[in-house]
Image: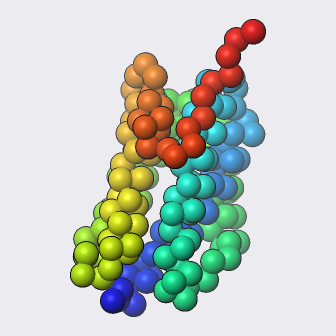
Amino acid sequence: MVSNASKDSLLEVYHGEQFGEAFFSTLLQHAENDEQSCILGALLQLETEGKMKVRPLLARLGLPLNDDAKSIARGVSMAETMLNTPLTEKFSAMADGIKAHGLPQYEAMADMVSADDGAEAHQVASFIGAHERVILQVCENIAAGAPDPAAPLATFLDFPLTLPSAN
């Protein structure tokens, strides 16, 4: 049985995915080229897929499925503060935030839910930590100027995005 603390954490994760969708969607609107559009679109896709994977468990646990307006507004607001920041600095700041807040929270969820709580809950909790590590890896790659910085997304996404072909 999933504890109340785990349920609360799961709902926070769901709201975090909504924050991420709003954040990356806002940045995507201001992408400077096709490569940035593809990377930001893939990160947006990752957040959407995260919601998709968490939502069935929320429903089974009787937790609300609606969007959280506060999380969405915070995502938009945070992205707007970064609009004029150079790309590498923007992603470096995102990596710092993920290391300080997102990753510890998401990994704690994986530690909180054991296989004894049910296979589905355990699978979702494990996915959440892996999901956040992929975002961190992409952010660190971009901040470091690595070639093909979004490569980890291609293998993690169920529906990966690709750059449009040059015609």
Left or right for 144, reference 89: left
Which residue is depicted at the point 37% across and 75% down? 121
Does the rendering let one see residue 34?
yes
Image quarter hosting the C terminus:
top right
- The answer to which of 125 and 8 lies nearer the viewer is 125
- Using the image, determine if residue 23 lies above or below residue 120: above
Report the residue that reaches farthest toward the top.
167
Which residue is depicted at the point 66% across and 31% down? 37
Left or right for 125, reference 74: left
Which percent across, then down, holds residue 152?
Answer: 41, 35
- Using the image, determine if residue 103 lies above or below residue 3: above
Which percent across, then down, holds residue 117?
Answer: 30, 82
- Using the image, determine if residue 123 lies above or below residue 2: above
Residue 118 placement: quadrant: bottom left
Which percent across, then down, holds residue 32?
Answer: 70, 26
Which residue is depicted at the point 44% across and 43% down? 156
